[in-house]
Image (tube, grey):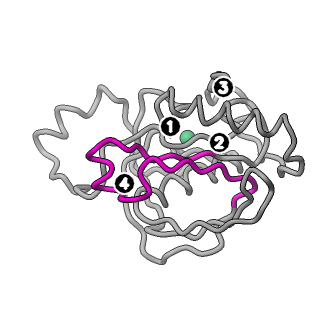
């Protein structure tokens, strides 16, 4: 396995619609391994292949499994998903606002509305079809990563974007904690 470089929005690959994965051979297996390693090292909770300059419809997702996260995510904490050709086939009407960041846009955060729960269909690393029902933070990560496959970034749909060092004071003094159910924003 190897750590890959994460590209920034100045690289046009990040804005392209990625190609369907059709070959689950050794190059694909290496890419999946490298992406998991790169995501964990970053650290992030999700990574899409275009972020490592590969225009393929592949995402990896892993919620952290420290003690706090285990309480928050239960048996989803620490589970690694490698998902090719993911599609959202069902989404809750209920939308929730949350704070997101992206490994391709370091130092920034944004407020984004996402479906509270989604069902994602895709293929595992052997090519077998799988379905994942995700809710809460995990559902958010899947939506964020799948957006990457269509060249969409969270800053395109965020209601507010700010720099990491900009909002600290204002947050503490004037903003109620409206996202008590959300953990500290994780980069994906
Ligand atoms: Zn991202």
Residue at mark 2: C-beta within 8 A of ligand 1: yes
Q: Which secondary structure, mark 4?
A: strand
Residue under label 1: 102
Q: Quadrant of residue 174?
A: top left
Query: Residue 55, relative to residue 87: is it above or below?
Result: above
Q: Nearer the viewer, mark 4 or mark 3?
A: 4
Q: Earlier in the sequence, mark 4 or mark 2?
A: 2
Residue closer to the observer: 129 or 42: 129
Residue 22: % across, % down: 88, 51
Q: Quadrant of residue 118?
A: bottom right
Q: Earlier in the sequence, mark 1 or mark 3?
A: 3
Q: Residue at x 26, y 46 (%)?
A: 68
Residue 34: % across, % down: 67, 30
Residue at mark 1: C-beta within 8 A of ligand 1: yes
Find residue 10 and name its label. Answer: 3
Q: CA distance from mark 1 to mark 3?
A: 14 Å
Quarter holding ligand 1: top right
Q: CA distance from mark 4 to mark 2?
A: 20 Å
Q: Residue at x 47, y 27 (%)?
A: 106
Q: Earlier in the sequence, mark 4 or mark 3?
A: 3
Q: Which residues are magenta?
A: 60-86
Residue 144: % across, % down: 55, 51
Residue under label 4: 98
Query: Residue 116, relative to residue 80: is it above or below?
Result: below
């Amino acid at each position: 396995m190897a750590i890959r470089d994460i590209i920034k929005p100045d690289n046009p690959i990040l804005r392209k619609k990625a190609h369907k994965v059709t070959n689950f051979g050794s190059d694909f297996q290496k890419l999946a391994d490298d992406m998991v390693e790169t995501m964990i090292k970053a650290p992030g909770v999700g990574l899409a292949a275009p972020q490592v300059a590969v225009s393929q419809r592949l995402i990896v997702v892993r919620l952290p499994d420290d003690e706090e996260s285990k309480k928050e995510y239960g048996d989803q904490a620490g589970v690694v998903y490698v998902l090719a050709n993911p599609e959202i086939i069902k989404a809750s009407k209920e939308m929730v606002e949350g704070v997101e960041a992206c490994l391709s846009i370091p130092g920034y955060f944004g407020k984004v509305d996402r479906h509270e729960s989604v069902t994602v269909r895709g293929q595992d690393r052997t090519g077998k079809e799988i379905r994942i029902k995700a809710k809460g933070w995990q559902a958010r990560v899947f939506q964020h990563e799948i957006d990457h496959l269509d060249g969409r970034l969270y800053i395109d749909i965020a209601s507010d974007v700010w720099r990491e060092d900009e909002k600290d004071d204002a947050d503490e003094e004037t903003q109620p904690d409206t996202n008590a159910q959300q953990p500290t924003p994780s980069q994906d």
